[in-house]
Amino acid sequence: MDILETIAAIATPPGPSARGIVRLSGSRAWPIAIETFHPDRPWPAPRYPEIGSGKLAIDGLTPRLPAMVALWPAPRTYTGQAIAEIHVVGSPPILDLLLTHCLTRGARPAEPGEFTLRGFLSGRIDLTRAEAVLGVIEATNASQLDAALQQLAGGLSGPILALRDRILDVVAGLEASLDFVDEPDVDPVERSILSAGLDEAADHLTDLARRLDDRNRPEGYPRVVLVGPPNAGKSRLFNALLGRDRAIVSPMAGTTRDYLTALVACDGLTVELVDTAGIEEAADALESRAQEHRARQSDRADLLLDCWPAPWGPRPVSNRDGRPRLHVETRIDEADRRVASGPIATSSKTGEGLAVLETAIAEALRNGDSGANLPIGTAGRCRGSLLAAIEALRSGSESIQIGAGDELIAFDLRLAVEELGKVVGAVVTDDILDRIFRRFCIGK
Ligand SMILES: Nc1nc2c(ncn2[C@@H]2O[C@H](COP(=O)(O)OP(=O)(O)OP(=O)(O)O)[C@@H](O)[C@H]2O)c(=O)[nH]1
Ligand SMILES: [Mg+2]
């Protein structure tokens, strides 16, 4: 891939739309774009970002369609190179003609993510921001979009870069003292301060890694898991929230054995709803498998819906494990009288309370640690590096405490610096580049 070649791509999504855009980046971007249209007014190539309007003038297209050309000079652009955009009516055959026109005049088709890759290679954006761009494009709900936008604004790379800088300073200090063999190693007071600092940094990163773990699911939706005793009406509630009969419902206790998942929209938030087996003592191997499934699902839940049927009377006090949960009263149409306060009261038969439940789910998830959200791609890529950095920092701190020599400490810290560098993209391997940019769409 030669990044000095001029590239072109249709930058708007496939299919007809009100407006379509062909984007070009590289030294020939401006001349090629200017050639595609007759400006309404004489238009000398500008030195500042500028937009000109006119009529499209390309081979094979007789009607003179209105077009707009926008030009941005290098280097303060998304790619760091000269960029041009041609805006026309978003008709796929016209966009194809326009792109072909650009390709016959010296541009080549852009690879997926190549615009963003150029931005990264020219130092305009760091890797976590490139991923944030991807996160914005791929966001399927408001909270994912928030996370991506926050990262785009430097949410993740800022603090890690600062931490990495501080460790680099320490390494530089240690290595400088290595050059003076006569001088003693760092004195004991300084050592204990240093060791505490490293531990603190490791704690901070551990917290970050934990939050990454929470976010690192391929599908990326918050998981809402139905739990409760057998016959509580979990499966029927699952169906009711889903709007169709997926799960088997029966008056027999222990109906659900496997767990079922489905995507459900709750108040504008897409969640993965999970139906599980009722909580009970397992009498045989099959039941104990069902309980294992249930336990694993509730361990991975972002929110538990703890179901208890209203006709059964007051709910026994359950021991709380600190997980976010909503108490849901079920089957209230069968109860003689409504429980006065507390849980959300629902009936899957009449539909009562379902809207309230949906709003409560969305609210609980939105109030959860939203600040900790990270785009999913970043989470997956960074996890290994963060764990390696944490280990290196802890080992560095230990070396200090047992009075190891400066070289050893410096070695650990260098390792931490390198791993943190991978997270923010200061140290980049081909493997990382490939993993990130392969997921982009063409034109971005
Ligand atoms: N009247 C009424 N019956 C309900 C309601 N919800 C569930 N039921 C009935 O209660 C029984 C048990 O419902 P399920 O949804 O299978 O219960 P479950 O919690 O999934 O039970 P297990 O899978 O065995 O753990 C079935 O006969 C349902 O028809 C409700 O809101 N109103
Ligand atoms: Mg069930």
Image (spheres, helix red, strand yellow):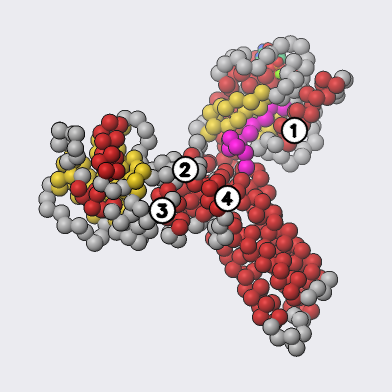
Residue under pointer 3: 2
Of labels 3 and 2, earlier in sequence is: 3
In percent of width and height, residue 428 lies at: 56, 57
Residues in magenta?
216-227
Q: CA distance from mark 3 to mark 2?
A: 18 Å
Residue under pointer 4: 431
- Specify whether residue 219 is painted magenta: yes
Q: Residues within 10 Å of mark 4 (few under 14, many from 20)?
A: few
For residue 45, side relative to residue 6 (left or right): left
Q: Residues within 10 Å of mark 2 (few under 14, many from 20)?
A: many
Of labels 4 and 3, earlier in sequence is: 3
In this rendered view, identify the residue nearer to me: 305 or 292: 292
Is label 1 or label 4 in front?
A: 4
- The amino acid pointed to by label 2 is Phe
- The amino acid pointed to by label 3 is Asp
Of labels 3 and 1, earlier in sequence is: 3
Residue under pointer 2: 440
For residue 385, side relative to residue 121 (left or right): right
Residue under pointer 1: 296
- The amino acid pointed to by label 1 is Arg
For label 1, the SS is helix
> How many numbered tags mark residues here?
4
For label 3, the SS is loop
Q: CA distance from mark 4 to mark 2?
A: 15 Å
Question: Residue sitting at 60 percent across and 48 percent down?
Answer: 381
- Specify whether residue 81 is painted magenta: no
